[in-house]
Image (cartoon, grey):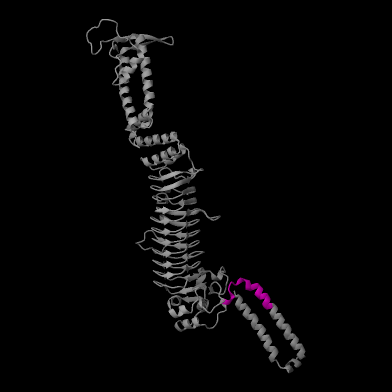
Amino acid sequence: MYSRSIRRMRLVGCIEVSTSMKETVPTRTLFAHGISPSDSHAASGRAIVFFFIINAIAFALFGASSSSLAQQDIPTSSRLTSLAAAKFPDLTHAERAMLWFSDIENVGRGDIAFAGPSTNRQDSSNDPKDAEKWDHQREIRATLIRWMLVDHQAAALMDPAGVQVLGARITGPLNLARVRTQFSLALARCSIPERIVLEFADLPALDLSGSYTGEINGHGMHVSGNVVLASGYHASSEVELDTARIDGDLDCGEGNFRHAEHPDPADPLKTALSAYIINVKGNVYLIQSSFDGALMLGGSTIGSDLHCDSGRFINPGNVAILAPGASIGGVLYLNKFGNLNDFEANGMVDFRVDSIGNSVDVENAKFLGARGEPHGFLGGGMSVKRAFTWRNVTLQNGATFDLSGASVEWLLDEEKSWPAPGDLRIDGFQYSGFGLDSPNDVKSRLRWLRLQPAGLHVQTYRELAKFYGDGGDEVSALQVLVAKEDARYLQYGWLGRVGGSFLKATIGYGHRPLLTVLWSMAVVLFGWLIVTLGMRAGVMRQTWPEASPEARAGPYEKLHPFLYSLDVFLPFVNLNQRSYWWPDAEASGDFAVLNRTVRLRGSALRYYLWLQILAGWLLSAIFVAGVTGLIRND
């Protein structure tokens, strides 16, 4: 496909040829053909008008597609081109286009130099995936780019726009290690198969949008503007930006990153993009990006938001995203961007970050993986100043949801997005409350706590009880504390379950000590009934007071069944009833109940009273322990 400038040049050439013919054809030749000079002048005029019309039509059809006509009109020579040609003979069309764009004398430059035949950025001829089909004239030597950025004579002839080219094939490794330059570098939709070294380089801006590159080493580099690896960017090997400093944004939106074809044995994580201890003052955009391998953000500092919206992070059985110790000043987005796909990760997503200055938004997200392989979301230890949202989340094949040790202001979740039993880890998780649309009732939240792995998780129950208590819902808070003790005694086997059931029924594990009063009243009232029946059956016999074994004159102490039951039940209390009366084990008698005669043996009544004495001691001890807090483990 021809560019607009080539088309215009051909049309203008036709007009020049016609004009020249008018001036040079002899008059006699015209007469020989039966054409008068006046007729020839008229014909020539009509030809000129005709070609002008064609030129205008061509400009209307093809002119609008060009964003920069002037930059394609490459002069045969300029000071910067001449200087470069002395060091790099046989300059290609692409190299001349790049040099002329960067030349300070080019006052009519567009936004970028076009190495190919089309000035349409999205034209298929500018797609670097087909770079093998490009001819030699689209090649740019990497050493020429370096020369432009480091040579002082070249720098004096360059425009501040820097080096900017689209649709070129860069040949040779591009080594800019420790280069400090005032010029930006933009190689858009280029093919750069060999290694790019930017180690400790200092650039105003770096743009590789839409390009296909091999390995990149940007360790320790400093970019005062934006770094762009977006808009269809493809990396066939690891991109390393460890300890880099970026004063603007790191834009990897719609970028494609892949681990090395033959991973280093020292890199078991199969790293695709390594950005350890990176410092980005702006945003990090990974919107709709695709990763075949791990994204490493450990220890990174991001001044604003981290966008992983609609991203696809695939590293099965391994780590998909690893960001321990990172700090994010704004929002962490793991969700769906607009009408794009859901966020998707196959492998562990580890955001055990230090702090998040705003909130975490995990919505319309899928955490995929095979059963038995590590996968899911790790947010342990993260500190979120505002809300943590967890909605419309898919957790496949036992994916983990871990917020152990984390702290958030509000948890906005939903029951359908909770993990399977045993896959929720929230030990040490602290929160102020739940969202209005989140489950807030105590039954739902107790189901939530029971999704934790087997074992006792005391803090999680205390935290939930605190939430209800701070909100004035003491009843729900008490239910949570009782549920905590249920979990405690369940781990002690059948004996623990029996003992726990008794403590729960009698004293609410120490959280409801007044329950013992009700049980005591029930025991005393039942004893009153039994002693009354024993008195009617005639099995209660007089006995000597313990302090006076000899016979006494005068009336004998009267039996009061209610006081007798109290005297038997209450330890350390003597109502002088049990000392005067006791069931006769050898006696038996009848009493009537609902027109039926029932026989009662004195020995049976004696056994009951012994049990009541023991119950009195036990319930009294439990009551004291509950009131003083000896049983509670808060």
Q: Position of residue 128 (x, y in %)?
A: 51, 69
Residue sitting farthest toward the top: 554
Magenta span: 54-70
Q: Residue at x 45, y 47 (%)?
A: 409
Q: Residue 403, relative to residue 55: is it above or below?
A: above
Q: Is residue 556 left or right of residue 277?
A: left
Q: Residue 315, relative to residue 545: is it above or below?
A: below
Q: Position of residue 527 (x, y in %)?
A: 35, 17
Magenta segment's dominant SS is helix
Q: Is residue 8 magenta?
A: no
Q: Residue 97, relative to residue 391: is it above or below?
A: below
Q: Position of residue 191 (x, y in %)?
A: 48, 70
Residue 167 appearing in the image: no
In which quadrant of the rendered image does the N terminus lie?
Answer: bottom right
| Image-quadrant location for residue 539 | top left
Residue sitting farthest toward the left: 550
Looking at this view, is 484 or 214 the one in front? 484
In which quadrant of the rendered image does the C terminus lie?
Answer: top left
